[in-house]
Image (cartoon, helix red, strand yellow):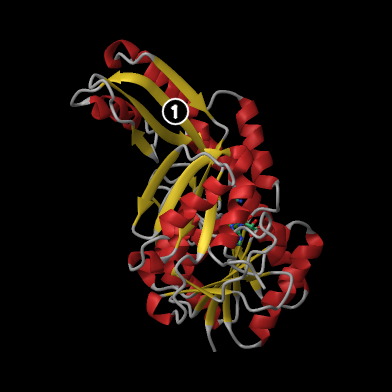
Amino acid sequence: MSRIVMKFGGTSVADLDRIRHVAQRVKAEVDAGHEVAVVVSAMSGVTNQLIGYVDSAGKLADLREYDVVVSSGEQVTSGLLAIVLQSIGVNARSWLGWQAPIRTDGSHGSARIREIEVEDLIRRFGEGQVAVFAGFQGIGPDGRISTLGRGGSDTSAVALAAALKADRCDIYTDVDGVYTTDPRIVTKARKLDKITYEEMLEMASQGAKVLQTRSVEMAMKHSVRVQVRSSFNDAEGTLVVDEDEIVEDALVSGIAYSRDEAKITLIRVPDRPGIAAGIFGPLADASINVDMIVQSYSADGNSTDMTFTVTKTDMDRAVSVLEELRGELKYDALTSDPNVVKVSVIGVGMRSHAGVAKKMFTTLADKGINLQVISTSEIKVSVLLAEEYAELALRSLHTAYGLDAA
Ligand code: ADP
Ligand code: ASP
Ligand code: MG
């Protein structure tokens, strides 16, 4: 007998037929004698619709009411799945975030899970009961509903698996596993049998939304055995594992992209000590995260151009913060561009092999694609390019690194 957590994403619970199908998969695990906790997302499209309502309702004074509205999608799915399970003879009970409870910090809208109380759940496992959790939600220190950020049901599932010391955490989604790149864009993408926590973390944080970044952090920290697999077939999925479990050490294991970037350039900023602090300090104070940064060579020794990226949703706010500081920063002009995409190649093999970045740059140059900003870390190289080249860049890099499926 094993204890398992099964998480089903939005497409997997998109309507009642699919929820019935999910119920059969849950029943199969219960019939095999396992203790099962299920985590569900909102039905596909529902969270976007709820966010749309919030945006139209009026100026948002604080995120507590946002959380009340957007968390409701998962409540519906958890209740529906519990009903369907009961109707096919499975002893099931729905759970909302406040009921376990799943305790989070107070950052409404993107809260972090702090602890989950599982004693009652474990007692109920002993009575043969299946727990059906509403993903994406918890309860903050203020006693109010909190949500975990987009894609947060993955994190609910992994956190639950860690707290329950589950043997497995299976993430059921609408693709067969983790691929070398988004299979919806590159048809030659190849499914990976295994990927390291570290690579998965980098893939997720660079935009591959198949797992929420925090869920991978949490799995890594607590050594949760995560498998990403399809809810529509029985094919083996992708296991996220420690590096020592990987036999084949590919130089590049995946390519991620993010359309959630926007580029801002300050033209001719005086080149003096303290200028970076003068720009990025106020942005940080306004809770605007800056990702890539490049400062151009100062040809005249007096002024320089500073280019950086923020998320698309923060672009307008960042521009107004900087416009207010124009007198102080004394730049000549400010430009902003939301039509950019960040493409990243990722692989632990990069630690020990040179030439990955060179191949990236020459491949993109051969296609006539201009690189606007470049950044690197130990296991990734990222470039910013015009959005219209996103697919061409992904496809050509995928081929260049030998990742295409046979
Ligand atoms: P769910 O609703 O099940 O949580 P998501 O839409 O959040 O599913 O994540 C699955 C999607 O992630 C896939 O449909 C795919 O388009 C996208 N994706 C991006 N990069 C990858 C990748 N490297 N491997 C697999 N899927 C990816
Ligand atoms: N429903 C939430 C979202 O769409 C959480 C999730 O699906 O993981 O972001
Ligand atoms: Mg998701």
Q: Residue at x 47, y 50 (%)?
A: 361
Q: Residue furthest top?
A: 327
- Residue 265 shown left or right of residue 258 in the figure: left
Judge whether 16 appears above or below 274 on screen: below
Judge whether 60 appears above or below 77 on screen: above
Q: Is 217 or 62 nearer to us in this picture? A: 217
Quadrant position of the C terminus in the picture: bottom right
Q: Examine the rendering and report whether any part of residue 285 can be seen.
A: yes
- Residue 167 shown left or right of residue 280 in the figure: right
Q: Residue at x 50, y 33 (%)?
A: 262
Count neighbours of disc 1 (C-alpha within 10 A) and say few if under 14, some if 14 to 19, many if 20 or more: many
The mark tally for this picture is: 1
Question: Residue 337: where, in percent of width, then height?
Answer: 52, 28
Judge whether 261 appears above or below 31 on screen: above
Q: Residue furthest right?
A: 17
Q: Residue at x 65, y 27 (%)?
A: 56
Judge whether 305 appears above or below 64 on screen: above
Question: Residue 74: where, in percent of width, then height?
Answer: 63, 53
Q: Is 176 or 67 nearer to us in this picture? A: 176
Question: Residue 258: where, in percent of width, then height?
Answer: 54, 46
Q: Residue at x 67, y 69 (%)?
A: 230
- Residue 88 shown left or right of residue 208 in the figure: right
Residue type for callout 1: Ile
- Residue 7 shown left or right of residue 204 in the figure: right
Q: Secondary structure at mark 1?
A: strand
Quadrant position of the N terminus in the picture: bottom right
Q: Residue furthest front?
A: 366
Q: Is 152 or 238 nearer to us in this picture? A: 238
Q: Examine the rendering and report whether any part of residue 103 can be seen.
A: no
Q: Tell me the quarter of the picture where residue 69 sits.
A: top right
Question: Residue 51: where, in percent of width, then height?
Answer: 62, 38
Identify residue for label 1. 264
